Image: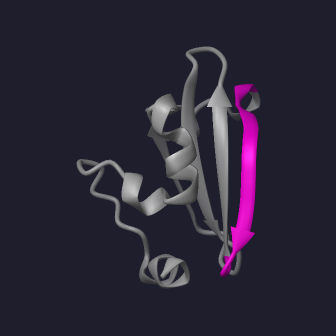
Amino acid sequence: MSPATTNLGSRRELAIRAGGGIEITLYWWPEDNSTTIEVRQLTSAERLAFSVPPEQALDAFYHPFAHLPPTSGERPPAEFARTLQ
């Protein structure tokens, strides 16, 4: 289970941006010094959340779908992908 799906009270928001109908948030988890990205579609409140290595966190914040784990089986919904093009 990733930190994005566990105790939400311990995460700290580092950056947030919104545009094109989506909101992207970068979180830091002080317990293990990990980082996660959360992408939320504003019209439906649908969310994607995944861990990224801390050294890639800023790049993942600006290009979240390029950093989806290849083994996660997750793909951004078509409406997410269209808003980023």
Quarter the N terminus occupies: top left
| Residue pictured at 69% horizontal, 34% vertical | 8
| Image vertical order of residue 21 relative to residue 57, above or below | below
| Residue pictured at 69% horizontal, 81% vertical | 43
**Residue 47 on the magenta span:** no
Name the spot of residue 24 as percent of width and height, x first: 65, 59
How many numbered circles does the render carry? Answer: 0
Name the spot of residue 4 as percent of width and height, x first: 56, 39
| Image vertical order of residue 19 relative to residue 38, above or below | below
Specify the color scheme: one colour
Give the residues drawn in magenta, as a range. 10-21
* Horizontal arrangement in the rendering, residue 51 relative to residue 71 (left or right): right
| Image vertical order of residue 2 relative to residue 40, above or below | above
Out of 22 and 60, give the one closest to the viewer: 60
Tell me which secondary structure the magenta stretch mostly adopts.
strand
The outermost residue toward the left is 71
| Residue pictured at 27% horizontal, 57% vertical | 73
| Residue pictured at 50% horizontal, 50% vertical | 60
Out of 57 and 74, give the one closest to the viewer: 57
* Horizontal arrangement in the rendering, residue 13 relative to residue 75 (left or right): right
**Residue 16 on the magenta span:** yes
Name the spot of residue 15 as percent of width and height, x first: 73, 47
Q: Quadrant of residue 62?
A: bottom right
* Horizontal arrangement in the rendering, residue 48 relative to residue 44 (left or right): left
